[in-house]
Amino acid sequence: MRTALITGGSRGIGLAIAEELAARGVRVAVSYRAQKPPVDALFLTQNGGAAFQSDVSDPRNCVQLVDTVLEKFCQLDILVCNAGVAWQGLTQDMTDEDYRRVMATDLDGVFYACRAVLPHMIGRKRGRIVTVSSMWGQVGGACEVAYSAAKAGVIGLTKALAKEVGPSGITVNCVAPGVIDTEMNGHLGPEVLSDLAEETPLGRLGSPRDVAECVAYLCSAAASFFTGQVLAPNGGLVI
């Protein structure tokens, strides 16, 4: 049985990814930043999964998280780097603290998590790593400069790491979602979300499951010859 670790797996896209992988017979471990464990985690009972509190923006936390997963399950076949935070506003209004929080979680956290799992995966000569970027990492978003920069960095990290660890039998791919109907986008309000749905060629917002199925595909045997690629479930909003 394969084991997966999903960072930021307690809600939204991360939760959908965890549920989808669990439904496909993968033993799932999720990390969450809050002090309380996720409430909606019934999927963890499937195949003996687990949840762990961790802050991926702290490199020591990432090492401890991976070590804990390996101690409990003895193997780690899949890493999904999903943990992220957003910030919207004019660039000149963004504080240093806000900037560092976005970059530390959305980009640094991906690097720390990947670095922590690589010795194990390289030693086994196999593994799947999937990073979660955003359409704004591909084209940039006004009033989301730091977020766009971090998510663009995730795409660059994915492509470079894929080249580096491919000879060790490890694939590294990225999913760059469009506008997804999650709590993170809830602050936009119904009118803005409706407008975004109208702007999307497929006429709707994405669901967390749309993203989860892309991730599950990249973790499947069918994607064994995919690496360094970016799948973009965005309904045609960015082409």
Image: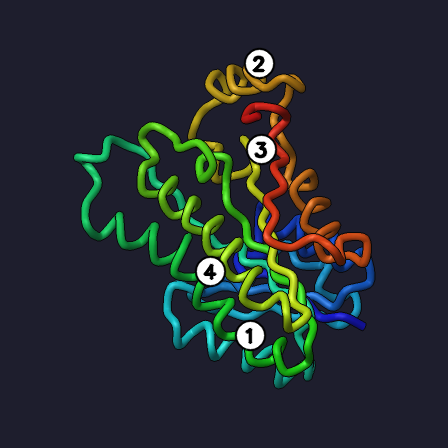
Confirm or deny contact between disc 4 and disc 2 (CB under 8 A). no
Q: Residue at x 44, y 68 (%)?
A: 112
Q: Which residue is mark 1?
A: 118
Q: Residue at x 54, y 31 (%)?
A: 179
Disc number lying in front (2 or 3) = 2
Badge nearest the viewer, 4 or 1: 1
Q: Are marks 1 and 2 in contact (CB under 8 Å)?
A: no
How far is disc 1 from disc 3 in space, using C-alphas?
32 Å
Q: Is residue 40 above or below residue 71?
A: above
In the image, what residue type sits under mark 4?
Val
Specify few, some or many for label 4: CA neighbours under 10 Å numbering under 14, 14-19, or 20 or more: many
Callout 2 secondary element:
helix
Residue 38 visible in the snapshot: no
**Quadrant of image for the C terminus:** top right
Of the residues shown, which amino acid type is indicated by label 2? Glu
Which residue was labeled with disc 4? 110
Where on the picture, by quarter, is residue 144?
top left
Upstream in sequence: badge 2 or badge 3: 3
Q: Residues within 10 Å of mark 1 (few under 14, many from 20)?
A: some
Question: Which residue is more in the foreground, 180 or 235?
Answer: 235
* Numbered tag placed on residue 137 in the rendering: none
Q: Which residue is mark 2?
A: 198
Q: Which sits earlier in the primary sequence, circle 4 or circle 1?
A: 4
The tag earlier along the polypeptide, 4 or 2, is: 4
Q: Mark 4 falls on what kind of element?
A: helix
Q: Amino acid at mark 1?
A: Leu
Q: Which residue is mark 3?
A: 181
Disc 2 from disc 3: Cα separation: 14 Å
Could you tell me which quadrant the N terminus lies in? bottom right
User: Cα distance, mark 4 to mark 1?
Assistant: 12 Å
Q: Earlier in the sequence, mark 1 or mark 3?
A: 1
> Would you place residue 110 above or below residue 72 in this image?
above
